[in-house]
Amino acid sequence: MDMRDARTTGRILVVDDEPDLVTILTKYFSEAGYAVDAAAHGGDALIAVSQYRPDVVVLDVMMEGLNGVQVLERIRALDPAIRVIMISGSPDATLRPRAMEMGAFAYVAKPVGLGKLHQTVAAALGKPDPLAPPRS
């Protein structure tokens, strides 16, 4: 697949400090035809955002160093067109409204269902639901 195809599908940046989850998400979205970059923490995420200008960032809330909310704030300042999907295993009920208020596209609780996340990514890109039955 050349990069032109990936550009049409979309470019995703996965940001999470759990390597296993990053691997799963990278593999899943690569196989679905997206260009996928990954970062293990907020600092790397911001470098990747300025380098690759992803269409969508899948961003973990709870990370060492810069947390997801701080990273969200900086991504919004860098490029408000980038859609940010927050993922979190935190029981903190104030996080979701705060993230949405700050301009997150969506907030998905962990454990993350790949299908649900894919639907959210597609929605963020303005694409049809990838799991909807094909219209005959």
Image (spheres, grey):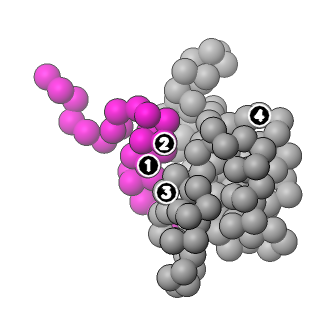
Task: Work out whether residue 50 can be spotted.
Answer: yes
The image quadrant where one finds the N terminus is top right
Which of the two discs, 3 and 4, sits closer to the camera?
Answer: 3
Cα–Cα gap, marks 3 and 4: 21 Å
Cα–Cα gap, marks 4 and 1: 21 Å
Residue under label 4: 52
Q: Are marks 1 and 2 in contact (CB under 8 Å)?
A: yes
Cα–Cα gap, marks 3 and 1: 7 Å
> Of residues 31 and 122, which is closer to you in this image?
122
Which of the two discs, 3 and 1, sits closer to the camera?
Answer: 3
Residue under label 3: 106
Of the residues under marks 3 and 1, which one precedes in the sequence?
3
The residue drawn where x is 72% and y is 59% is 73
Q: Are marks 3 and 1 in contact (CB under 8 Å)?
A: yes
Q: Which mark is residue 93?
A: none
Element under label 4? Answer: helix
Residue 131 included in the magenta stretch of the image: yes
Cα–Cα gap, marks 1 and 2: 6 Å
Q: Are marks 3 and 2 in contact (CB under 8 Å)?
A: yes
Left/right placement of residue 11 relative to residue 133 reads right
The residue stretch that appears in magenta: 110-136
> Of residues 99 and 46, which is closer to you in this image?
99
Of the residues under marks 4 and 1, which one precedes in the sequence?
4
Q: Residues within 10 Å of mark 2 (few under 14, many from 20)?
A: some
